[in-house]
Image: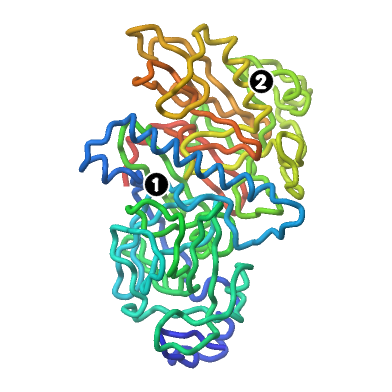
Amino acid sequence: MSVHHSTTTYSAMEAMPLLLFLALLAVPAYCLQSPRQSYHLELARVDSVDTGSLNITDHELLRRAIQRSRERLASITPRLYPTRNRKVVAGEAPVLSAGGEYLVKLGLGTPQRCFTAAIDTASDLIWTQCQPCVKCYRQKDPVFNPMASTTYAVVPCNSDTCDELDTHRCGRSGSEDDDDDDVCQYTYTYGGNSTTRGTLAVDTLTIGDDSFHGVVFGCSSSSVGGPPAEVSGVVGLGRGPLSLVSQLSVRRFMYCLPPPASRSAGRLVLGADATAMRNASDRIVVPMSINPRYPSYYYLNLNGMSIGDKAMSSSLRSSMNATAPGTPDPDPNPNVAASPEPVSGDGDGGGGTGPDAYGMVIDIASTITFLEESLYEELVDDLEEEIRLPRGSGSTLGLDLCFILPEGVPMSRVYAPSMSLAFDGEWLKLEKEELFVEDRESGMMCLMIGKTDGVSILGNYQQQNIQVMYNLRRERITFVKTNCEAMTH
């Protein structure tokens, strides 16, 4: 077994002892050192370049983000609820590649080349477009040339690393003078017609001033339905073995996203500095749930919803055990959370009937939140009772539930209740500014929540001004309200 560098085969990579070399082939991460410190990265919005050069309005930026969220949702549902006769492929990520909203800049190869990637908490694979590109989308960064990197090596198709993706085959690396057919070729499907294909490889990844050798990534030679031109690839932060956090053995990470209107960059912290304020009164800690069908997702068990201090009723309350915030706890031991059914199972449900119908996926790459249809319809009914404004239609932002604002009155001056989500009995409160947006072109106030016939999704609009900290070792997620614009490196 060997690793192929460019078009030449190196036995044990010349200087590496044979036994050590063979042992490294058996694990997903080839020769990664443990992180020596924390890594602070700026999260730029995908449209940030256009914002300065084309003077795009806040309204248009938000409309674009909402449209990308809907395109992303269209690919999530069939992946979470496939037909019974269809094989579930581990190499498929149930998200759309064009859905990335936040970008990071990394270095790849030796000498390093700039790699602008969309971060994605709902997929695993790290990939970028590579030369020779047979069918690629246009990107602003120079396309990565693996032949110019002295640390680039392809992954053999008979390795355990290649087996991490079911949709792989043995083939050639794509180089014209390479006649070796023992190279791991992958197809990674994101939904609909969005796919990326290429060679699974290893190379040096640089974060700030630190380099990690032997990071597994996809060197894509064909991408259909790709991201915007500002993006040259994707960095998966999911729970699978090929994600960035898994390969770097990161035990926790945290991000903080400012409100969209601020146009400020967000922050991503990997490693020990990824902490959340401990003494905050609104800090909640929620255990992660697992769906065996898609173990890469960060699932939360949604077991309660309320509008203001009133719990949502009807069928929702009969299937959930959380007590609404501000109401007496019927449990004789208030320190013990209710124990609803765990979010797990075969995932064949939909429309509130499946075993994971009330699970919620945290998705940084989707702007708006989506609720399972029965929950959404009940939310709409309750909001109509609370908000004494007429319903509107025809939102130029593409949102569904809107209320007509009085002429000359901004959204900031009208009443709208808060909404709380209970995750295993811990309540996350969302204020009006985290739920609604003013559609100035239509003169309406619109809810930044849509409906889905699949699993619910917590989008990044509802995560604004919140430290979201993922503790991967303890399998829990912490939410703390804060001013993300005030965060510094």
**Count of marks, rendered view:** 2
- Numbered disc in front, either 1 or 2: 1
One can see residue 267 in this view:
yes
One can see residue 33 in this view:
no
**Residue on which disc 2 sits:** 324
Q: Nearer the viewer, residue 137 or 406?
A: 137
**Residue on which disc 1 sits:** 102
What's the amino acid at mark 2? Ala
Q: Does 129 sit above or below residue 339?
A: below
- Tell me the element at label 2: loop
Q: Does 81 sit above or below residue 250?
A: above
Tags 1 and 2 in contact by the CB under 8 Å rule? no
Q: Residues within 10 Å of mark 2 (few under 14, many from 20)?
A: many
Q: Does 154 sit above or below residue 228?
A: below
Question: In this rendering, would 272 be left or right of 345?
Answer: left
Residue name at image x 37 percent, y 76 percent: 146
Question: In this rendering, would 281 be left or right of 147?
Answer: right
What's the amino acid at mark 1? Tyr
Residue 259 spot, x, y in % from top left: 38, 32
Q: In which quarter of the image is residue 299?
A: top right
Residue name at image x 69 percent, y 51 percent: 82
User: Which numbered dot is residue 355?
Assistant: none
Residue name at image x 59 percent, y 82 percent: 23
Q: Nearer the viewer, residue 445 or 304?
A: 445
- Tell me the element at label 1: strand
Q: Residues within 10 Å of mark 1 (few under 14, many from 20)?
A: many
